[in-house]
């Protein structure tokens, strides 16, 4: 493989951008924070990326120790990509970047793609406690692992097993929560978020 382009600056920010500054790399990290993903799943959830660019970025991430590729055992028998512990430490970086970018999000444009699990990062900033929270929007369902110290911070689709709490809301409410315009307790009290579940986490969300 050709050598990566580098800034050649003795600065930690420049060193970080040597690894993640290329177009699409951080969005690939966003997808892999949800756990192991097949190449076809990554391509489907990164609308606009070409197959050549996605393959190139994944190879770079493997070479730089941000991601690994492994073969799932039968019956899946498919290759998946997943973050290394070093790559997973980019979670707070993406959360901070997303928080900084919320002000410029504005209204959704007709050409904007959207996936339900893209709302996971802003919701992680807005929810406290520990446990698995399943979230349902018009666009689909995803789940969060609050307080997780290892493994995926969130995942696409329903939670594996019984979640500690289930939140149902519309996309406008989820966006307002992510922007900091509306707190989760206020949204629950205003009946813009419906909380179901019998565990301590669900009860605390209803009682805050």
Image: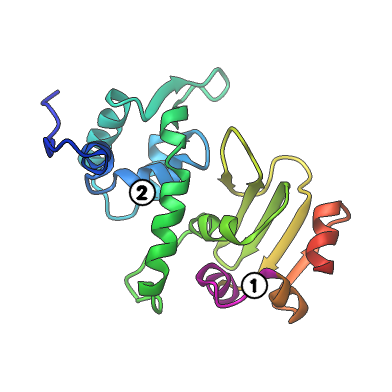
Q: Are marks 2 and 1 in contact (CB under 8 Å)?
A: no
Q: Residue 173 — which label? A: none
Q: Earlier in the sequence, mark 2 or mark 1?
A: 2
Q: Point out the stretch of residues depicted in magenta.
A: 172-184
Q: Is residue 46 above or below residue 176?
A: above
Tell me, yes or no, whether the highlighted magenta stretch contains residue 192: no
Q: Is residue 44 left or right of residue 135?
A: left
Q: Residue at x 40, y 79 (%)?
A: 107
Tally of numbered discs:
2
Other-residue count near label 2 (Cα within 10 Å), few / some / many at <14 / 14–19 / ≥20? some
Residue 4 lies in quadrant: top left
Which residue does the numbered mark 2 point to in the structure image?
A: 27
Q: Is residue 1 above or below residue 42?
A: above
Q: Is residue 76 above or below residue 25?
A: above
Which residue does the numbered mark 1 point to in the structure image?
A: 183
Q: State the separation of the CA atoms marked 2 and 1.
A: 26 Å
Q: Residue at x 55, y 77 (%)?
A: 181
Q: Nearer the viewer, residue 85 or 28?
A: 85
Disc 2 is placed on an element classified as helix
Q: Residue at x 71, y 62 (%)?
A: 167
Q: Is residue 7 above or below residue 194?
A: above
Percent across and percent down for residue 27 are 36, 48
Percent across and percent down for residue 147 are 66, 44
Q: Quadrant of the N terminus?
A: top left
- Mark nearest the camera among 2 and 1 is 1
Percent across and percent down for residue 96 are 43, 56
């Amino acid at each position: 493989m050709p050598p990566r382009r580098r800034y050649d600056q003795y600065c930690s920010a420049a060193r970080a951008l040597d690894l993640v500054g290329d177009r699409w790399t951080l969005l690939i990290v966003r997808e892999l924070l949800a756990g192991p993903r097949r190449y076809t799943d990554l391509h489907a959830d990164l609308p606009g990326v070409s197959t050549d660019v996605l393959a190139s970025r994944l190879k770079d991430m493997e070479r730089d120790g941000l991601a690994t590729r492994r073969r799932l055992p039968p019956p899946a028998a498919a290759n998946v990509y997943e973050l290394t512990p070093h790559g997973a430490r980019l979670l707070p970086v993406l959360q901070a970047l997303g928080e900084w970018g919320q002000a410029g999000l504005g209204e959704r444009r007709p050409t904007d793609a959207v996936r339900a699990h893209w709302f996971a990062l802003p919701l992680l900033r807005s929810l406290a406690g520990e446990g698995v929270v399943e979230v349902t929007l018009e666009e689909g369902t995803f789940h969060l692992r609050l307080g997780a110290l290892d493994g995926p911070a969130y995942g696409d689709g329903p939670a594996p097993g019984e979640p500690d709490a289930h939140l149902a809301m519309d996309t406008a409410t989820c966006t307002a929560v992510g922007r900091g315009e509306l707190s989760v307790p206020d949204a629950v009290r205003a009946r813009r978020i419906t909380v179901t579940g019998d565990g301590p986490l669900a009860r605390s969300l209803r009682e805050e």
